[in-house]
Amino acid sequence: MKKQVLKALAVVGMLAATGLSTGMAQAQTNCSVWLVESSRFMNVPFGAFMPDRAYVPGATNAANSINTVDLPVNVGVIKCGNELMLYDAGWKQEEYLKMTGSDHWAPLPEQLKMLGFSAEQVTKIVIGHGHWDHAGQLMDFPNAVLYVQREELKGIEWALNYPHPNIMAVNTDPGGCMRTPACGYTPLTLDEIYGKVLRGQAVIVDGRMEILPGVRIHPAFRSHTEGSQLLEVPTSIGKLVFGSDAYSSWEGIRDWMLANPQQTDSVQQFLAYEKCYKITGGYHNCVAAHEPLSYTEGYPLTKNSWVGPNGSRMAEIALAPGERSRKP
Amino acid sequence: MRAAWHNTKGGGMPGQESHTARLPVRVDWKIGALAAIVVLLLALVALGVQREMRMPATARTTALPMTERGVERPALSAAEEAYAASLWTVHSQAKQDAVRMTSAGLAYQMKDIDTTELRARADTLVTGFRQAQQRMGDLTPPPALQPIHQRYLNALGRYEQAAQLMLRFTSDSNNAHLLKAQELSQLSSEDLLRVSDVLWPGEHKPN
């Protein structure tokens, strides 16, 4: 009798475990993901983006034979159940912020519209970091809650109060700031972040945080800025990790090369790369912000692409069960 | 001349004489018409250039195609360059103060600083923005840059108001002051970019 009860309990336990794991698996594979190109920085010297890929005239080495590259500014569009999220928010080209040398800028709301979404539907925006070209359209998403690392905001404070003008500088010369710690944060971008915080539409994150089942923020401090953060997203093709400028170049992650140095601590950037290898099991599912091969066969994750508003490109990366394709 | 031209044609067919004899007259008429068209085109170009020169720098830049904005921007004159260089020293500090003001607000919201510290910072910022406006009073902008000068001055005034509101919040804890201050600051930050676009294009790099 006892044996029969034990057997029955074991069977029930196994069934429960199976049900639980199935439920968990479903909870962790329910996100659809698209990538949109906010704009493209044209003709950037490859060496300025990736020092190891600097152009060497007459080089026989393929890695050093490309002079300039066009760098997309990629934004992740993530739909998990009824939640619509953005990873990064691009920048906003206005008559007063044209960014000479950039092309194909399109408003994110318009790009979302092409995917069948509205700006009002966006419930969360996770910014990989607070630089002007990644957190520049926050106010266009009135219902979105911003997720930003406390360390990111504290890092700006630290830089501004550093007792040496070359460290604390927001501007270095009329040619523009380059690599001082606070130089990528324009007053306008910070105003937008602050606006979200003041209106109770921001979550200031301390390190790691699960914001939806299976959707996790991972800190990647100093991998590009003081408080950079990654986003792990479960999909039908496995886990993806978005990295903003910590993952500026997908080839950089693949080949273990530094990219987009700016304020980057190279060791921390490599550790951020490693995080993607650990979470996804390789480099294929690491989502890069400025990879020149984006939207081509050269970056397979993003190859299912098409051209959107103003020549900007878009890609469908993964669809949750039952989610319809948004590709025209 | 007429004979020489005729001679080059050789004997020709009967009836051709009268036809060819009229040609020089027609050529003269064509040259005249062509000259008139050229003069008209030159006048149009001159008018266009003159109109372009009269336009303020901002209008000139926004009229350019998106991909070429800034590239084809007419160079600033020597006086304008000198003014831009002088304003840059004000701008460097003002931009830093603007970031400081927002950062102070964020630090307060994160409870990294208390009201006393916020008050001290806001107080310093009020003084800073006021001094920046005074420094601008010492600058004499070239006529074409007068609107730019005024825009920048207004932006500094709004930044000062924002710092004042932050200061007022430290007395009455009314959040409405902070919200209004943020709005004013954002307007000024947009104006800083507008001025920067004319005087220091390329100030912001891909990051």
Image: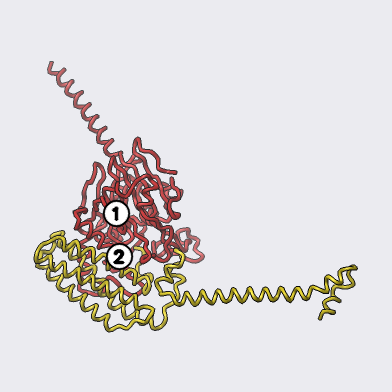
Chain colours: A red, B yellow
Identify the residue under disc 2. Answer: A184
Q: Is residue A136 above or below residue B135?
A: above
Query: Residue A154 location, x and y as percent?
Result: 20, 62
Q: Which residue is mark 1?
A: A272
Q: Residue at x 36, y 53 (%)?
A: A108
Q: Element at badge 2? A: loop
Residue A254's disc is: none
Q: Position of residue A111 (x, y in %)?
A: 38, 51
Chain ID, mark 1: A
State the quadrant of the C terminus of chain A: top left
Q: What residue is rendered at 18% in x and 76% in y?
A: B127
In the image, taking residue B21 as reference, residue B154 lies left or right, namely left
Q: Residues within 10 Å of mark 2 (few under 14, many from 20)?
A: many
Horizontal relation, residue B110 to residue B138: left or right? left
Q: Quadrant of the N terminus of chain A?
A: top left
Query: In which chain is the residue bearing label 2?
Result: A
- In the image, B113 versus A216, the foreground residue is B113
Local SS, label 1: helix
Asked whether, in this view, residue B58 is left or right of residue B90, the answer is: right
